[in-house]
Image (cartoon, rainbow, N blue to C red):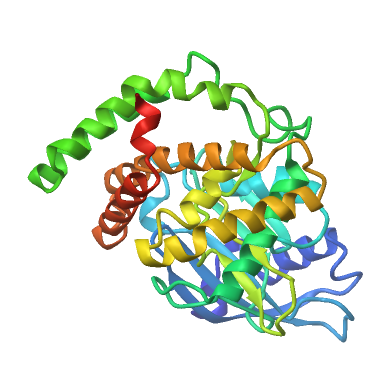
Amino acid sequence: MAAETLPAAASADRLSEVLRRCGALENSLVSDVAVDSSRATVLSRITRLRLTCAGEVPGAPSTLILKTSLPERIGKPDWDGGRQEVAFYNDVAAAMPVGLVPRCFEAKWEADTRAWHLLLEDLTDSHLIATTWPLPPSVAQCEKIVRAKARFHAHWWDDPRLGTTVGTWLPADDRQLETFDAAVTRFFDRVGDLLPSHRRDLYRRLIDRGPELNKRYHSHRDMTVVQGDAHYWNCFLPKDGGCDVRFFDWDCWRVDVGTDDLAYMIALHWYPDRRKILERSLLDLYHATIAAHGVTRYDRRSLDADYRLSVLWQIATPVWQSNGNIPPVIWWNNLERIMLAVDDLGCRDLLS
């Protein structure tokens, strides 16, 4: 990509302004911007930018990550991708100590065009993703990630800003279950006889029992900020073996129970053998870590109860993914794994 075809958000003048505002450029300026690499993900484009500054500027970044929408999704009335992630970096990450997420230099979403972008710290040289999807991380890597997730959750645990300046609470009369009911009907039509009757019945029972099950959420007790799309490959691990774990991809964040992230990481993405070996010990580690970081009135039994309920609700994830045209290689395997977890953990009993 030639310099003149760079997006406006990545022009030298624009980056000079942004980095000065963040205190990362002092009185210098960016004299040139080049593209090191660019790749499309399922929902966005990730571009690594290389910056040349006028003179030596101690502490100024030499590279940045520009994350933008895929061009074909911009302007679609039913597409709000990026909006939540921009809000995360402006409202949540900005109110946190440094660490656990990449530093964000700018997060913008345009209401009229639905275009958005993030200018993020480039961690390419210092961090890595544990494995190539869908291979699970090692035991040590899983433990490091769960500890970091627990520290993040503990930071926001029952914070008075939740639901006010950080996220929003769904009202008691929210129509989410009606929306989910319609989505399930479309899903049934799409998959046909690939979904047996006992699984169809499980979805219908979940919708029927939804108002009762949602009382846990509406208690607004023992809540935190959850990542939503909290799989193991949305996480950077430090190459030096340290503890500087960073979570990225925050377009699905919300205020909810912390076990939603755990169920997404473990039950949705692991087959039974690995899950049965590590599930219990990772939950123990998570509980011990949040307790060590100030969450003292949430006992181990409560964590188990919340985890089982979160696993049950995760059967909704393949439905949303399928209806959102996520590739079947993702949602079909997620469907099979989460159904196995529901059976293993006796989650159907929650619908009695």
Give whichever of 111, 259 is nearer the camera.
259
Residue 229 placed where, x, y %?
50, 52
Using residue 246 as the reference point, say whether residue 304 is left or right of it: left
Q: Quadrant of the C terminus?
A: top left
Q: Is residue 1 visible?
A: yes
Where residue 7 appears, x then y in whole percent? 55, 65
Q: Residue furthest left?
A: 193
Q: Residue at x 69, y 64 (%)?
A: 102
Nearer the observer, 324 or 247: 247
The x and y percentages for residue 191 are: 15, 45
**Total marks placed:** 0
The residue closer to the viewer here, 49 or 338, is 338
In this view, 180 is above or below 80 = above
Q: Is residue 77 visible?
A: no
Tell me which residue sits at (39%, 71%) in the image.
134
Q: Is residue 77 above or below residue 95?
A: above
